[in-house]
Image: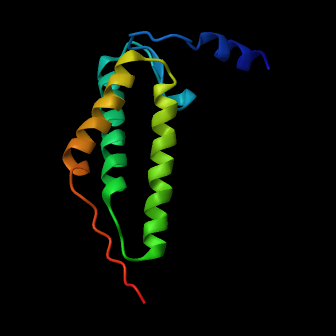
Amino acid sequence: MEDMDMDMMEMEMFFYQSANVKFLFKAWTIQDNVGAYFGALLLTFLLGFAIEWLSTRRIKSKKVDCLAYFFKLLMAYALMLIVMTFNALLLVAALLGLTFGYFTFGFRPIIVKRTIR
């Protein structure tokens, strides 16, 4: 129980900018490693980009579409947890990934053909 209390005390509750961050899992703790931090920023950007890409895909198979929706939700919750680290650059990377994904895929109208019987 003491280990959990110590981990909770280490988490910042305000936005900060540092290369020291716990990225999704305790084992993925980054300590002053600029390369790993850049990788985390890139992964965060790509996660936001992929969420927007999946948002515009419509698949004819209900099972595959449901599976794609599951992964979109999984990535969205993972992105939320990344933003909740309160690391300012991870927040910016998430916003840029979502924005660039929307810019790339979001301006195309989705046309769904419905048959009226």
Asked whether residue 93 appears in the rendered view, the answer is yes
Q: Nearer the viewer, residue 30 or 81?
A: 81
Q: Residue 2: image x %, image y %?
A: 77, 15
Q: Nearer the viewer, residue 5 or 103?
A: 103
Q: Nearer the viewer, residue 82 or 53?
A: 53
Question: Residue, x 34% and y 36% (percent of image)?
Answer: 43
Task: Name the quarter where the C terminus is drawn.
Answer: bottom left
Give above or below for 33 relative to 52: above
Asked whether residue 39 appears in the rendered view, the answer is no
Residue 15 horizontal side relative to residue 113, left or right: right
Task: Name the quarter where the N terminus is drawn.
Answer: top right
Q: Residue furthest right?
A: 1
Q: Residue 96: image x %, image y %?
A: 28, 31
Question: Residue, x 49% and y 66% (percent of image)?
Answer: 66
Q: Residue furthest front?
A: 117
Residue 9 horizontal side relative to residue 80, left or right: right
Tally of marks: 0
Give above or below for 13 relative to 108: above
Give above or below for 1 relative to 40: above
Question: Residue, x 31% and y 35% (percent of image)?
Answer: 45
